[in-house]
Image: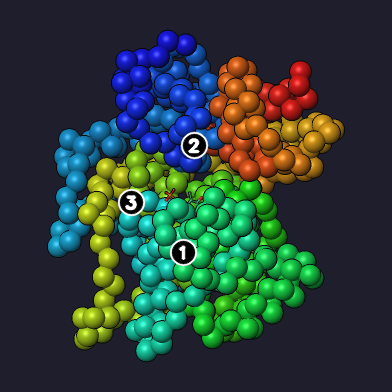
Amino acid sequence: MSVPDWLSKGWNHIWLPYTQMQTAPMPLPVACTAGSRIILADGQELIDGVASWWTACHGYNHPHITAAVAAQLREMPHVMFGGLAHAPAYRLAARLANLTPEGLDRVFFTDSGSVAVEVAMKIAIQAWLNRGERRSKFMAFRDGYHGDTMATMAVCDPEEGMHALFSGVLMEHVIAPLPRNAETRSEFERLMDANASDLAGIIVEPLVQGAGGMVFHDPEVLRLLRSYADHYGLTLIFDEIFTGFGRTAAMFAHQLAGVRPDILTLSKALTGGTSPLAATIVSNEIFKLFLSEDSSKAFMHGPTFMANPLGCAAANASLDLFESEDRLGQANKIGAQMKSELGVCRKISDVVDVRVMGAIGVVQLKRIDDVGALQKEFIRRGVWVRPLRNVIYLTPALTIQSDELSELTHAIGDVLSGS
Ligand SMILES: *Cc1c(COP(=O)(O)O)cnc(C)c1O
């Protein structure tokens, strides 16, 4: 492929995500996107199996979203959120509060998932401070992933995660196994009982731990966490940055489990993959702890681009689409198709598990030695699939066509079986 001028000129100045820059090949230059397709500079089209890190739930360039953003852009791309109000943010806050469980009614906007989680942690800690108690620890879980900033790295899986190098540098929390069976449950209970008086809260990705390897767990796990949080008075944070907005075939994963968190974090698909925006949604009980005649009890946080109107317009348009089109039905259909088409991978020797939940399809291998080589094979077959740790997974746009999805599942089967 010929390398565009901007790529060769910028290559010595760019620093890429999660990349050893000394050995990294140049990334593929993209000209544009449409639906479930990424169109490269040389005209080659890739069917996207990842939806750009799980954001583009309606596919790329959905006309309803681009029209809403274009209209907002003409009116007002941005205005500061301190002391000034704008319709897109207030409408979105009311809609999100309406979609999430009864009693989860306060929305704090930020501009990335990691910051939404930091805000959730800071609120949980300050809620204790406002009650006169100093608590800074969280219980978090193995295989968990909550972001790349200093505070969120500390609640990721400390060993398997991407942040092992930083052990000893980060805040120390209590990292437990998720209580999915008798053995892990007793380990969890031991850690919980031993540390409860130091804990501010518990943080977990409900039903699916995403970046940690697309690991699923049963609703009972969340019910158990809820009961422990209630017993010890801890704040239960559900990080739905990955699972939110239909990925599990429910609007939010916690609805499938019937468990309400005290704080919920959302981002990724919030704007339908259009622009960065995140939300931390807080229970009325916790919000009340910040109300006081004493101004020092206020929550002192406010990102410059808080509640950016373009992002809020995109998110409102995305919610319109969830109302007017059957995204959850589409997620279920995608799941059924992946179940039937990925099943053949079970026969391949290095495959240890094939699992599907909602519009998440996972083929787990013993291990993946050469991710780069695998990815090249996928690109050669015209699909964009990015293996993660020891899994090859599909999290396509919920609007993907069934023949496009078949190309993705067949590419995985072909690449793994070497045909
Ligand atoms: C991606 C992700 C984050 C971090 O979001 P960023 O926008 O990348 O900072 C946090 N939690 C979960 C569950 C995620 O999937």
Label 3 near label 1: C-beta < 8 Å? Answer: no
Q: Secondary structure at mark 3?
A: loop
Residue 20 numbered tag:
2
Q: Secondary structure at mark 1?
A: loop
Q: Residue at x 60, y 22 (%)?
A: 376
Which sits in the foreground, 141 or 271? 141
Type of residue at label 1?
A: Val
To which residue does mark 3 refer? 111
To which residue does mark 1 refer? 169
Q: Judge from the rendering whether residue 269 lies leftward or rightward of residue 145; answer left or right.
A: left
Q: Rounded to the nearest whole Å, what is the CA distance between mark 2 and mark 3?
A: 26 Å
Q: Residue at x 42, y 36 (%)?
A: 16
Q: Secondary structure at mark 2?
A: loop
Q: Judge from the rendering whether residue 349 lies leftward or rightward of residue 245; answer left or right.
A: right
Q: Ligand 1 within 8 A of label 1's CB?
A: no
Q: Is residue 137 visible?
A: yes
Using the rendered view, name the quadrant where residue 395 is placed. Answer: top right
Q: Position of residue 170 (x, y in %)?
A: 46, 65
Which residue is situated farthest in the front direction here?
22
Q: Ligand 1 within 8 A of label 2's CB?
A: no
Q: Residue at x 51, y 65 (%)?
A: 168
In this rendering, is residue 188 above or below 24? below
Q: Rounded to the nearest whole Å, what is the CA distance between mark 1 and mark 3?
A: 25 Å
Q: Position of residue 357 (x, y in %)?
A: 67, 46
Using the rendered view, name the quadrant where residue 156 is placed. Answer: bottom right
The answer to which of marks 2 and 3 sits earlier in the sequence is: 2
Q: Count the marks: how many?
A: 3
* In this view, the mark in front (2 or 3): 2
The answer to which of marks 1 and 3 sits earlier in the sequence is: 3
Type of residue at label 3?
A: Asp
Type of residue at label 2?
A: Gln
